[in-house]
């Protein structure tokens, strides 16, 4: 019997046939010629250079505001080595600079205190102006954006009289600046999505999400900039600490598929009193156009896992049979037909290329690591052998910053544990490494959900021949002096205090098992909730009324208790928080990796993590698990920062919506 804890080989699973006539092929290929998944062992490693994302070019300035117009398009890109087929992906790019569309998107370079205005445009259309469907199977049985439901039934859980096919209509998007300190109308709220302005949107479809019109009106009144159909204009004040942020899609019930298709990019915030002077750290960062002759020593690296078909297209399962359960599905049971609890790709992609090589000089490098995987936890180490396990750390990794900016002091690690959505700002010193040396960035995290403990002791680490490798370093002679400060001698900016907490909220992470007698189905949804006075878990759905309503200007402690068997990365929008306790009851001191400010924290199974956050922007935001399959199926909750000391009546949602809708 299969369980979701067993990792299925993509090649073996892809030929299976699910109950109800469903097959393991992406939505675009239903009824088409069957393709075989690519064996990752056949993908050549370390033949392509690491792509360093250039800076996104602005389209202008209005006073102090830097303006961008960034579209989302579909195109083909060389993700695999050039000896292999190209891959159809989605990506961001400047609409005024067509050559900038890429996966990942070009980096938005921002300065603290200098506002940025981005018009995000949904251009998922073909050359005729017709909409393009999703590259992956979208499960219409979840609580999701649901454009076919029309205005009255959008953002709901449809009901079906028979198992449906994957959704094949126009794709909604809404972009979230992860780690940003933004007003609610610019945060990328999951129900503020919008479709492309395509000519063939079916009659009766909702073109925008439930919160889009409300946020559009607020933004237009505040900033005087009109939102055009198929777009949204977001304003980022950049009134926060210098930090490594990133942007990605956040559409309700579709984040996993939209991000898997390529919708992600870096947003680097520099300057201000919480940054260091130029020259103290390795630099420069990538600029606009990024000429090849210019050496970059401040490099952001987005790490993701992907799988491919033989023609180079992305493989992502389009049936729950991938997890070992072959039906019956909704409506015969409560098991979703297409959603899988997690997915782990069998190839590692860094900055949009499989297993690239980075040629480094004999000097220090600032490497900003982002775990952009859907569900995979990473344990990164610099090793002198890519396959030997246990691996010896060939160089230390100095962490100087986390999600919310610089740490109080540098911390030396032999390895980094990075949860999905988290960022590690590091310095690695190649100065004493002989020219010609080859080193590898390896991954000793599991090819499965993360629990706790050490690789080879408490869990089986990633396959050392495939997902256990990330990229290769080749050491080259230094081209000029390295004037950056050694990491152990850095004096980092101080951390501002969050103040005393006004209250503590007890919250819980849980999951719901199916009503079906066949336990092989695994969970049917993942949930967040509250804890009763007796200590019992009270699971909550996305559609339930808001239960977390911090008062504007106050600081709170949230005690996150994990009642599941997996570790979960919990992300809060709008705020950066501090970890103040861990352990079975949350009273043990924070770990070495908990210093500084975070917006994403790992909560291990059967443990409680206590975080402290200050809420200084009123409005509606979300908190959720950053395993994207979990987030898309109920492991996300709204929260409301209020100006009064009691929650508003009801849940504050626009009227005219129901939780269940019939199709």
Image (cartoon, helix red, strand yellow):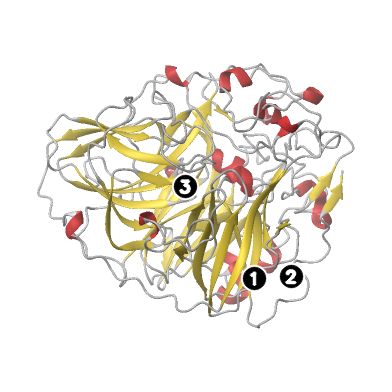
Residue lying farthest to the right in this orientation: 161
Of the 4 image quadrants, the one containing the C terminus is: top right
Residue 51: which quarter of the image?
A: top left
Q: Nearer the viewer, residue 268 or 639?
A: 639
Percent coordinates x, y for residue 580 in the rendering: 45, 66
The first of marks 3 and 1 along the sequence is: 3
Q: Is residue 390 above or below residue 555?
A: above
Contact between marks 1 and 2 (CB within 8 A): the answer is: yes
Contact between marks 3 and 1 (CB within 8 A): the answer is: no
Residue 56 visible from this viewpoint: no
Q: CA distance from mark 1 to mark 2?
A: 9 Å
Q: Which residue is mark 3?
A: 419
Residue 547: which quarter of the image?
A: bottom right
Residue 169 visible from this viewpoint: yes
Q: Residue at x 75, y 41 (%)?
A: 140
Of the 4 image quadrants, the one containing the N terminus is: top right
Q: Is residue 651 above or below residue 456?
A: below
- SS of the residue under disc 1: strand
Residue 111: which quarter of the image?
A: bottom left
Q: Which residue is mark 2?
A: 652
The first of marks 1 and 2 along the sequence is: 1
Percent coordinates x, y for residue 82 in the rendering: 39, 23
Q: Crowding at label 3, few (<14), some or many (≥20) Cα neighbours within 10 Å?
A: many
Q: Residue at x 18, y 41 (%)?
A: 430
Q: Which residue is mark 1?
A: 640
- SS of the residue under disc 3: loop
Percent coordinates x, y for residue 176 in the rendering: 54, 56
């Amino acid at each position: 019997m299969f369980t979701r804890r067993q990792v299925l080989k993509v090649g073996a699973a892809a030929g299976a046939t699910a109950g109800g006539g469903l097959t393991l092929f992406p939505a675009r290929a239903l009824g088409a010629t069957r393709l075989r998944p690519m064996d990752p062992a056949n993908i050549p490693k370390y033949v392509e250079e690491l792509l360093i994302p250039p800076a996104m070019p602005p389209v202008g300035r209005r006073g102090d505001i830097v303006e961008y117009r960034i579209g989302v398009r579909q195109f083909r890109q060389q993700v695999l080595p050039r000896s292999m087929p190209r891959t159809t992906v989605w990506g961001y790019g400047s609409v005024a600079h067509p050559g900038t569309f890429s996966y990942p998107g070009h980096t938005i370079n921002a300065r603290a205190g200098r506002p940025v205005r981005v018009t995000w445009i949904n251009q998922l259309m073909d050359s005729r102006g017709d909409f393009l469907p999703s590259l992956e199977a979208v499960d219409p049985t979840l609580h999701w954006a649901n454009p076919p439901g029309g205005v009255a039934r959008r953002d709901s859980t449809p009901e079906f009289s028979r198992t449906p096919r994957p959704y094949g209509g126009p794709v909604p998007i809404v972009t979230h600046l992860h780690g940003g300190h933004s007003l609610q109308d610019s945060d990328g709220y999951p129900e503020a999505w919008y479709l492309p302005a395509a000519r063939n949107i079916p009659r009766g479809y909702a073109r925008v999400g439930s919160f889009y019109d409300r946020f559009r009106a607020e933004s237009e009144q505040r900033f005087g900039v009109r939102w055009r159909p198929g777009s949204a204009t977001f304003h980022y004040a950049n009134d926060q600490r210098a930090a490594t942020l990133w942007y990605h899609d956040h559409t309700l019930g579709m984040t996993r598929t939209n991000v898997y298709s390529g919708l992600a990019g870096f947003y680097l915030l520099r300057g201000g009193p919480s940054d260091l002077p130029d020259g103290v750290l390795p630099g420069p960062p990538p600029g606009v156009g990024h000429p090849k002759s210019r050496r970059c020593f401040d490099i952001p690296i987005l790490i993701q896992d992907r799988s491919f078909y033989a023609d180079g297209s992305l493989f992502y399962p389009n049936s729950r049979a991938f997890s070992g359960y072959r039906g019956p599905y909704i409506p015969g049971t409560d098991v979703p037909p297409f959603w899988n609890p997690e997915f782990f790709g069998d190839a590692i992609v860094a900055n949009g290329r499989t297993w690239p090589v980075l040629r480094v000089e004999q000097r220090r490098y600032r490497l900003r690591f982002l775990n952009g995987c859907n569900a995979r936890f990473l344990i990164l180490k610099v090793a002198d052998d890519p396959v030997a396990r246990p691996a010896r750390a060939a160089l230390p990794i100095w962490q100087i910053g986390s999600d919310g900016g610089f740490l109080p002091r540098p911390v030396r690690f032999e390895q980094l544990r990075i949860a999905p959505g988290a960022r590690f700002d590091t310095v690695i010193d190649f100065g004493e490494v002989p020219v010609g040396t080859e080193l590898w960035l390896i991954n000793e995290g599991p090819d499965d959900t993360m629990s706790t403990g050490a690789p080879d002791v408490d869990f089986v680490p990633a396959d050392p021949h495939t997902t256990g490798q990330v990229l290769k370093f080749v050491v080259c002679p230094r081209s000029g002096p390295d004037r950056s400060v050694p990491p152990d001698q850095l004096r980092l900016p101080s951390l501002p205090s969050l103040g005393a907490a006004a209250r503590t909220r007890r919250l819980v992470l849980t999951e719901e098992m199916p009503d079906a007698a066949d336990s092989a189905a695994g969970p049917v949804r993942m949930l967040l909730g509250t804890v009763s006075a007796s200590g019992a878990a009270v699971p909550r759905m996305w559609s339930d009324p808001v239960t977390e309503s911090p008062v504007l200007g106050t600081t709170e402690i949230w005690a996150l208790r994990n009642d599941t068997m997996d570790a979960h990365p919990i992300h809060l929008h709008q705020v950066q928080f501090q970890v103040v306790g861990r352990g079975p009851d949350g009273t043990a001191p924070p770990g070495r990796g908990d210093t500084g400010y975070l917006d994403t924290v790992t909560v291990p199974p059967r443990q409680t993590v206590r975080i402290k956050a200050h809420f200084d922007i009123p409005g509606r935001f979300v908190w959720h698990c950053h395993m994207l399959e979990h987030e898309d199926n109920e492991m996300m909750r709204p929260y409301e920062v209020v100006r009064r000391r009691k929650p508003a009546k009801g849940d504050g949602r626009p009227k005219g919506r129901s939780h269940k809708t019939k199709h």
